[in-house]
Image (cartoon, rainbow, N blue to C red):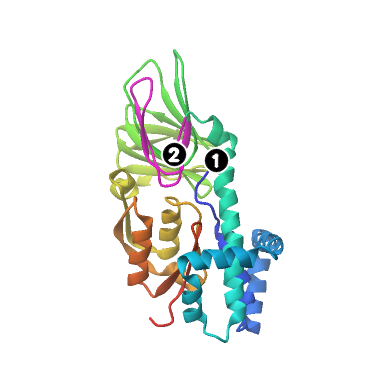
Amino acid sequence: MHEGQGSPAKDAAAEWFVRLRDDAVSDGDRAAFAAWRDADPAHAEAYREMERLWGGLDRIGDRIGRRAAGRRGADRALRARTGPKAPGRRRALRRMAAAASVAAAVGVGAYALTPTGLLADHRTGAGEQRRVTLEDGSTAHLNTATALSADFTAGSRRIALHGGEAYFEVAKDAARPFVVEAAGGRIEALGTAFSVRHREGAVEVIVTESKVAVSGPGRAAAVVAAGQGVRITDAGVGRVAPADARRALAWRRGRLVFDNRPLGEVLAELERYRPGRIVIIDGGLASLPVTGAFAVADSDVTLETIERTLPLRLYRLSDLLVLVDADPAR
């Protein structure tokens, strides 16, 4: 599954790693870090992973960071941000660029070489979308970083959505049920159009026409009608509720639409449409509200728009890494 390359724990670990190496780090910062680390074993493991990755880059990190900074002009931006008396933070940011760039490159490459990527019948890369006509005449619209396989027999039509997101328009065939399987969930079409998305350890289903029957681990099927949605988790099928299909499926019109959504969520969504990572250095920025409609095809323009309208600054340190930090001038 390629549902964003990072996780909240890893993003926070990266932020703490840089903060603790800033010359201005305080005892309060260290205490807050210890509280975060001890609150969840996943936090401690994410931080250990960051330390392991960093340790292996002692010799090559500065070289990669300088090369990326030279291409993007990041050295000048970092000097303006940190001032001449904060060399520790500049070195940390350069080495973070190297570490995160390598991690992102490994993550992107791993997706391409996994059995999912190799064996899927149809797939898309980051930022790619594709319309696929299945052998029964049904249509699958694949969103970014999606992989699926189809198994059609005389008595059934089965789709395995390995990762990503797809919108299905199902051809009528009463003799052969049309079923999508995703991460333990089972969605059976009842003559319909609907979307299925892997998202943060769950599967989200939104119906735009007719109905689907949705089942999950250990739970009876729930019927979801047009205009409704539901989440499937390891605990089973959640509550069926109204869904804003126009906003959620705006990607089919080449748009991403946000209505007062936190910046952290917006950047995580935007990250799906581009290779590499977008990392928030100042955690306080994650809750800033964002409203707007942005083009899927040009994530760089979207980032520039966000930078102009919010009190933050972007550092493009490589083709695979964008850092987001607070702008003290605003």
Locate residue 249, reporting x and y percent: 33, 45
Q: Work out whether 137 lies above or below 214.
A: above
Q: Work out whether 257 lies above or below 169.
A: below
Residue 53 sits in which quadrant? bottom right
Q: Residues within 10 Å of mark 2 (few under 14, many from 20)?
A: some
In this orientation, which residue lies closer to the viewer: 124 or 3? 124
Q: Are marks 2 and 1 in contact (CB under 8 Å)?
A: no
Locate residue 95, reporting x and y percent: 61, 67
Question: Circle 1 — which element?
Answer: helix
- Residue 268 colored in magenta in the image: no
Q: Amino acid at mark 1?
A: Ala
The numbered dot on residue 124 is 2
At x 62% / y 65%, what residue is drawn? Answer: 63
Locate residue 150, reporting x and y percent: 46, 25
Q: Is residue 37 left or right of residue 217?
A: right
Residue 98 sits in which quadrant? bottom right
At x 70% / y 65%, what residue is drawn? Answer: 58
In this orientation, which residue lies closer to the viewer: 320 or 261? 320
The residues colored magenta run 122-148
Q: Earlier in the sequence, mark 2 or mark 1?
A: 1
Residue carrying label 1? 112
Q: Is residue 41 visible?
A: yes
Q: Residues within 10 Å of mark 1 (few under 14, many from 20)?
A: some
How far is mark 2 from mark 1, CA to CA?
10 Å
